[in-house]
Amino acid sequence: MTTESGKRRKTLAGNTTAILRIIQSIPSPKAEPFKQWMAQVAAQRIEQMQDP
């Protein structure tokens, strides 16, 4: 990736699906609040799609 100063840096990147799958697989109590939030947002989105 290129930085704002124009230098090229090696970095790891992933699409949204890949990043969310990684987060789901984290077996840490600190990750649980984020996982629960993601599930809640997903449920709300599904409801919106069913009843716009």
Image (cartoon, rainbow, N blue to C red):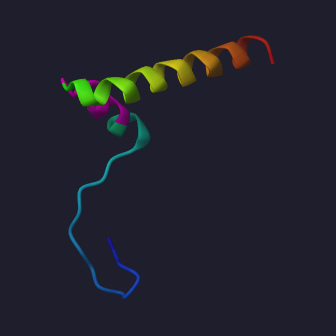
Residue, x 57% and y 15% (percent of image)? 43
**Residue furthest bottom in the image:** 5
Report the predominant secondary structure element of the magenta stretch.
helix
Q: Residue 5 appears at what percent x and percent y?
A: 37, 88
Q: Which of 11 and 25 is in front in this view?
A: 25
Residue 26 in picture, x, y percent from top left: 22, 28
Q: Quadrant of the N terminus?
A: bottom left
Q: Quadrant of residue 23?
A: top left
Residues rendered magenta in the picture: 20-27
Rendering coords of residue 21 (x, y %): 32, 29
| Residue at (33, 37) in percent of width and height | 18
Depicted 19 relative to depicted 6: above or below: above
33 part of magenta stretch: no
Position of the C terminus by quadrant: top right
Q: Dividing the picture into quarters, in which one does residue 24 lie?
A: top left
Left of 13 or right of it: where is 48? right
* Residue 21 counted in the magenta span: yes
The residue located at (63%, 22%) in the rendering is 45
Residue 12 vs residue 34: left or right? left
Front-most of residues 21 and 44:
44
